[in-house]
Amino acid sequence: MKHVRIVTDDRKKVVHSLRHNMKDTLRRGDVDRDKQNLILGHTLGGDGETYGGPEGRLEEATRAMRMAILREA
């Protein structure tokens, strides 16, 4: 929360609401559920989630974020 407060003093803006807003953005951007979970920090607990290493997962998440944000604009 201390990082959010650096950007805004609006008490209605909290980490939890930002996560919900991001989920809505990802849905509207047609980002598939696995990538949504990757971006939001959720896990399915499967072994396949760790394949490819952290760099590959970061690239995948970055592509999904760009897709969602560009569709919002």
Image (cartoon, grey):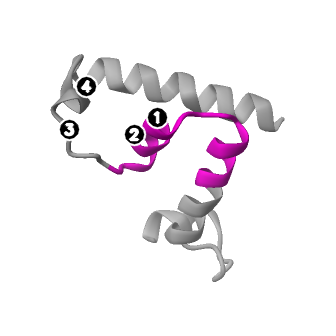
- Farthest bottom residue in view: 11
Q: Mark 4 points at which residue?
A: 54
Q: Work out whether 5 lies above or below 57.
A: below
Q: Work out whether 42 lies above or below 39.
A: below
Q: Is mark 3 on a helix, strand or loop?
A: loop
Q: Is mark 1 on a helix, strand or loop?
A: helix
- Main SS, magenta region, reads helix
Q: Mark 2 points at which residue?
A: 38
- Mark 3 or 4: the one toward you: 3
Give the spatial CA distance, label 1 vs label 4: 14 Å
Query: What is the number of the mark on residue 35?
Result: 1
Left of 58 or right of it: where is 12? right
Amino acid identity at mark 1: Lys
Amino acid identity at mark 2: Leu
Q: Which of marks 4 and 2 is nearer the N terminus?
A: 2
Amino acid identity at mark 4: Pro
Q: Do the residues labelled 2 and 1 touch (CB within 8 Å)?
A: yes
